Image: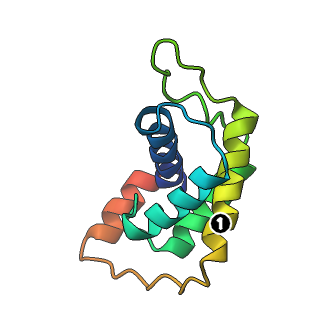
């Protein structure tokens, strides 16, 4: 899923940030899963279609990247464990999927010169 990496991890970081600071580190239970799945549809964290966001969550979960330690918790707050946060993301992806089916993402139109810029940034 080349090209997805940066924004997929950004999406996960948004979810982690919300869970740590907005929820004050509350338990990553089923109620929070349902609330976040609904919120991601009503007030999206990304401008990407839900099908792409769901694919991004599933893809990130296949990586061995550390997902739960991007931000330091508040003083006195217990950080989420890696397994705990991954399980939450997996349940969140399942819940989002249960709200589908999601229409396929529309083809993105390239603006003149944009393809060349993208190619320059993707060379490594």
Locate residue 118 relative to residue 54 in the image: left or right: left
Residue 73 vs residue 111: left or right? right
From what the image shows, is residue 73 above or below residue 107? above
* Residue at 38% across, 80% down: 108
Report the residue marked by disc 1.
95
**Which residue lies at the image location 59% right of the left edge and 60% below the top edge?**
34
Q: Residue furthest front?
A: 31
Q: Nearer the viewer, residue 32 or 58?
A: 32
In terms of secondary structure, where does tag 1 sit?
A: helix
**For residue 93, above or below residue 70:** below
Residue 69 drawn at (x, y percent): 58, 27
Where is residue 111, by image quadrant?
A: bottom left
Q: Quarter-wise, where is residue 93 in the image?
A: bottom right
* Residue beneath the point at 34% across and 82% down: 109
- Above or below: residue 58 compared with residue 102: above
Q: Position of residue 75 (x, y in %)?
A: 46, 12
In x, y percent, where is residue 7?
46, 53
């Amino acid at each position: 899923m080349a090209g997805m990496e940066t924004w997929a991890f950004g999406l996960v970081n948004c979810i982690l940030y919300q869970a740590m600071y907005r929820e004050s580190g509350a338990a990553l239970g089923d109620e929070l899963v349902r609330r976040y799945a609904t919120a991601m549809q009503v007030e999206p964290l990304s401008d990407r279609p839900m099908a792409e966001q769901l694919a991004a969550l599933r893809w990130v979960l296949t990586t061995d990247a550390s997902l739960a330690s991007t931000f330091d918790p508040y003083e006195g707050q217990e950080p989420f464990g890696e397994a705990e946060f991954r399980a939450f993301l997996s349940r969140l992806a399942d819940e989002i999927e249960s709200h589908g089916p999601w229409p396929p993402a529309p083809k993105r139109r390239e603006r003149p010169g944009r393809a060349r810029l993208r190619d320059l940034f993707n060379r490594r």
